[in-house]
Amino acid sequence: MAAHFGRRLRKGAATTAAVAAAVAALSASQAPGATGEDPGRQTTAGTAASVRDGDGNATGNSPYYTDLPPLNSPRPSPSSSVGPSGSGGGRTEGGIPATVLDAYQKAAAELRSSKPGCNMPWQLLAAIGNVESGQARGGQVDADGTTLHRILGPQLDGNGFALIPDTDNGAYDGNSTYDQAVGPMQFIPSTWAWAGRDGNGDGKKDPNNVYDAALAAGHYLCRNDWDLAHEADLHSAILSYNNSQDYLNLVLNWMEYYRKGTHSVPDGSGGVPEHRSDDDSGRTTSPSPSQPPRTKPAPKPDKPADDNGKGDGKGDDDKGGSDNGGNDNGGHETPHPKPPRPPVPPTPPPTHTDLVDHLEDAGTKKLAAMAGDAFTERIGTRAETKAGKSVAKIRVRFTITGDTDATFTGGESVATVATDAKGLALAPALQAGEKTGDFKVTAAVVGRSVKGVDYTATVTARAADTLARTGDTPLTCTPGGEFADQVQVKATYKGAVADKVETTATLIKSETDATENDKGPYFKDADGKAVRTLTGLRTDAEGLLTLPKLYADDTTGTFLLRVTTAGGATLTVELKVEAATDAPESPSPDPSASATAS
């Protein structure tokens, strides 16, 4: 690859500075191991340290493509032509397959709305997509964005890669022994289980679909309240995807390249990178047990004298002659070398995770909050040995499950926290959504299957404890007419504004009989028919609720309107229907009196 890049430099570099920058980028891109595309690929160079879980990054540090961006402008040349997948060289490297490009841009647009503080550029997704899978192998996707063939990394069996035993029973990667990175953005199944998203609205979260994978990658990179407009957060996010400085440098190079301008090419016609971090690894192959390695015969030593002093190799206990059938060949014998035993690797010392026997609740109190509010109580979990001693520096994963839209602070449903010196992991604060009911939070040790802890949390409906009219104008009307003023109320809870509180309004029979009245004032439904009970009303962001206009039938008298909310707040409003009072007529002038006066 270095020679290939050198030719590219000599041809395209315009200045010494450009050459220096390109060479620096080249040296930064030679990663020692990280995305594969099929199970039969050669594995990463060397023997990497065994990592027993992939929670620390999206890909499990699988191999990736190391090709650098071309030196020429990413903008298409008028004479450029698009060849088949994998062809076209530099002409297609800057082009992104149309469906893949659309997936990146739609994911970035969704994040601008859902996580505006993240400042996600679509070019970052494109850079990672190129480094991980060559833009879904040159855009080999169908009309819905699903790859035509599965893109798989090598199995993460600890042999040069992280050691990640199967977590999905082969559902995503087809491997029920070890996990493999899957799809155009190369998620490992254990990460996809919590980071997966439905990006194309088909109701499924499929790592092999570029819309789903791009949106999942975007949310993954935007977690932890990272602002990608800040260099430190951008670098942290990329390293969380694959923990390698070389990977970081390579992704930054591609992102900058795409920022200078790119173009779409037809699906299936994009260029596929040629070099990978696991190519030319130089990894040695262990000899087959049936073919031990050959060794050079040792020199034939003089046969030492035995106990009888004759030097003939026939001691008192050796009456059968020499090993060569009695012919000592002048006092020498041919040795039979034994194959050397392979070195036994040292047993690694136990890690903190190895010491954990179980998780225990650390005094978490009742978890309850109203819809839309933050939970005041936080979950605390302690990691312990079998003897009950606390274990520090253990990663504990908290996962929210159930029919809920509750999240942790930051909008995620999964959070990983390291235990402190006392073995305590304190989960981020829970934030209730709008769905009411119970949900579950599970605490589990990352990288080890031990007894965890389940917590039940409850979201109750938004409530108000006080209702009051915002005005004091009497509400009156004539029979068959309409009330001039609409009823407006304000709801509060413990003195604070109670917003989005479900409210009911009913015309009742009396103070002691809250059943619906069958006469007197009424509301109108969409068809103009009289209704005397309204449900599904909600206060606004200021806790205010303005009821629809009221009308009166021909019945006169005093009537009652009762407004109630979740939480028990109640307000009764008086309505009066009275006949109009006729004004006295002025006496008409007397014509005879006028004539007399004249």
Image (tube, rainbow, N blue to C red):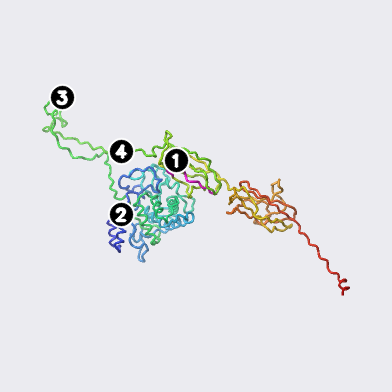
CA separation in Å, label 1 and label 3: 73 Å
Callout 2 secondary element: helix
CA separation in Å, label 1 and label 4: 32 Å
Mark 3 residue crowding within 10 angstroms, few (<14) / some (14–19) / many (20+): few
Q: Within the magenta stretch, is there residue 253? A: no
Q: Is residue 544 left or right of residue 259?
A: right
Task: Tell me the kind of residue under disc 1.
Answer: Leu
Numbered circle sitting on residue 346: 4
Q: Earlier in the sequence, mark 1 or mark 4?
A: 4
- Would you say residue 298 is visible in this rendering? yes
CA separation in Å, label 2 and label 1: 42 Å
Q: Which residue is mark 2?
A: 27
Horizontal and vertical percent position of residue 453: 47, 39
Total number of numbered labels? 4
Nearer to the camera, 418 or 37 = 418
Task: Tell me the kind of residue under disc 2.
Answer: Ser
Q: Which residue is mark 1?
A: 424
Please identify the residue farthest to the bottom as the structure is shown: 598
Q: Which residue is mark 3?
A: 316
- Magenta highlight range: 417-434
Q: Nearer the viewer, mark 1 or mark 3?
A: 1
Q: Earlier in the sequence, mark 2 or mark 1?
A: 2
Q: Are marks 1 and 4 in contact (CB under 8 Å)?
A: no
Q: Nearer the viewer, mark 2 or mark 3?
A: 2
CA separation in Å, label 4 and label 2: 33 Å
Q: Earlier in the sequence, mark 2 or mark 3?
A: 2
Quadrant of the snapshot with the N terminus: bottom left
Q: Nearer the viewer, mark 1 or mark 4?
A: 1
CA separation in Å, label 3 and label 4: 44 Å
Q: Residue at x 46, y 55 (%)?
A: 117
